[in-house]
Amino acid sequence: MIENNKNLFYAQTGLILTGANAYDRNDAEVADLAGKIADLHFNKDVVVWFSRSKTGQVEVNPYWPRGSALSVACFFINNDDFNTNAFFSFLESAAFTDPVGIDDFRAWIISLPDVLSYIDALPDARLLWDDYCKIINARVPKWNNAINEAAKTLRDFFGGSAPEIGFAPNLFSCYSVDFVRVNNKIITIAAEPDIEIILHETLHTAVAVYREKIIRFANNFGLSGLADRKKMIELGYMADDSSGSAAHAIEECFVRAISAVLAGESGERLNMHSEFGFNGAPLIAARFKNVKPIYNNFGTFIDKILSARSAL
């Protein structure tokens, strides 16, 4: 279930060369490898191409949303063949925030296979990929327990509808997590697997089924106390004040609350989510613990939460 993706590694090398530094400085192996990557010499045009992923749209993560879109795109490229239809369909299904930038996003991202091929042709880059694989391989045994436990929890929730899950390590981004759906597999992209993180990314697909319902709620009632508007904009969960952006924040609140409960996290974790602006997380979690819904009756659970908030 470990999906160590060479495209993702090369994409991260490009980001590091444009100033990305979200890796764990206390992880000696990763910090050493990042230093070696920073010493690589890329064609100027390739560096400029990667620099366009830095939007500055969100202060806490200047590479959002293009950096995340770049990571996701890596899973739709196979031997220079970029399945753009599947990639853009996934972004739409995931309600991905429109990736801004100085040029058109689609015109920019379709050059990714050429850029990756350029990097792969560099002997030094291929050697660093080998070093990266050695680090990953040494960490797989301790990661497997979390992945297996998350898979069991998801089978209990989804029943026969449980998607296959995978984990794609991105050791150079320890502060953000992404996911991608390829066929029926949900792949979590993160620095290391954590049960709540894997549940979180996979449960997005369960909540997304009810997105239109959540958008209608947001259109009529806004955030309704489920999330803090100012913090949502600061963190990039809302791009503007549209009902679609509000619905995205509300969906994230549901996912955070439910994944924390299913992972057996303490109230402290839920309070942390609330402090980040997901005010409704403790309330949703408490209701989830009492009702114990599963995938088959999940829509009823969401209905009752939204109805209670609309009555306030």
Image (cartoon, rainbow, N blue to C red):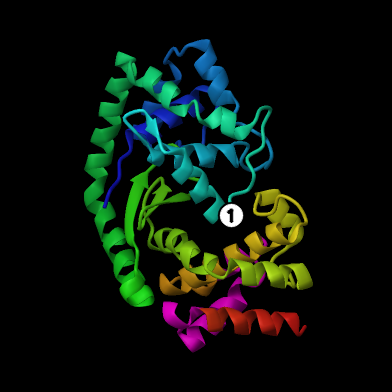
The residue singled out by tag 1 in the image is: 95
- Secondary structure type for disc 1: loop
- Tell me the amino acid under the disc marked 1: Ala
Q: Residue at x 38, y 57 (%)?
A: 194
Name the quadrant containing residue 26: top left
How many residues crowd around disc 1 within 10 Å: few (fewer than 14), some, or many (20 or more)? some
Above or below residue 234? Residue 109 is above
Segment colored magenta: 270-298
Q: Examine the rendered structure and indicate whether residue 38 appears above or below residue 141.
A: above
Dominant SS type (magenta): helix
Q: 110 or 69: which is nearer to us?
A: 110
The answer to whether 189 appears left or right of 237 in the picture is left
Q: Residue 302 in the image: x percent, y percent?
A: 58, 78
Q: Quadrant of residue 162?
A: bottom left
Q: Quadrant of the C terminus?
A: bottom right
Closest to the observer, 154 or 78: 78
Say if 64 sits above or below 153 in the image: above
Q: Position of residue 133 (x, y in %)?
A: 26, 34
Q: Position of residue 38 (x, y in %)?
A: 45, 20
Whether residue 280 is in magenta: the answer is yes
Tell me which residue sits at (69%, 27%) in the image: 102
The picture places residue 101, in percent across and down from the top left corner, at 67, 32
- Residue 38 visible, this orientation: yes
Question: Is residue 91 highlighted in magenta?
Answer: no
Among all residues in the image, which is located at the extreme bottom?
Answer: 290
State the residue at coordinates (67%, 66%).
215
